[in-house]
Image (spheres, helix red, strand yellow):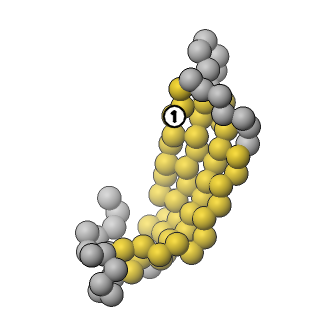
Amino acid sequence: TLMPAEAAVLTVEYKVNLLAPARGPRFSAVGAVKRAGATIMVCTGDVFEKPDGEARKLVATMTTTVMVVRDRGLAD
């Protein structure tokens, strides 16, 4: 993890784009931390559908911005 164990996060922004119907039967998700600053972190994620015998297809994407909070009793 890129965050100290004693820290907590507060959501600044959370956005999800549903791009296509998700029917399955299998899905995979890939997440990435785009920026891990001392106070603000920006992360993204993509969800892919993997129908049997077909190429995977992007069905959803998300972006979140969180504020890292330390020493305020929120991590308990």
**Residue at image location 35% in from the left, 63% down from the top:** 2
Task: Tell whether 32 sits left or right of 63.
Answer: left
Where is residue 51? Give x, y as percent: 61, 20
Where is residue 65? Give x, y as percent: 55, 68
Where is residue 54? Give x, y as percent: 64, 16
Residue 40 seen in this snapshot: yes
Considering every residue shown, the one lying at the far top of the view is 53
Considering every residue shown, the one lying at the far right of the view is 20
Considering every residue shown, the one lying at the far bottom of the view is 72
**Residue situated in front as seen by the camera: 17 or 76:** 76
Specify the quadrant of the image occupied by residue 4: bottom left
Residue 38 seen in this snapshot: no
Q: Amino acid at mark 1?
A: Ser
**Residue at image location 58% in from the left, 44% down from the top:** 46
Q: Secondary structure at mark 1?
A: strand
The correct choice, above or below, for 26 with respect to 65 in the image is above
- Count of numbered marks: 1
Residues packed near mark 1 inside 10 Å, few (<14), some (14 to 19) or many (20 plus): few
**Residue situated in front as seen by the camera: 22 or 46:** 22
**Residue at image location 34% in from the left, 80% down from the top:** 74
Specify the quadrant of the image occupied by residue 56: top right
Where is residue 7? Give x, y as percent: 32, 75
Task: Tell whether 39 sits left or right of 61.
Answer: left
Residue ID for mark 1: 28
Placement of the N terminus among the 4 image quadrants: bottom left
**Residue at image location 59% in from the left, 34% down from the top:** 48
Placement of the C terminus among the 4 image quadrants: bottom left
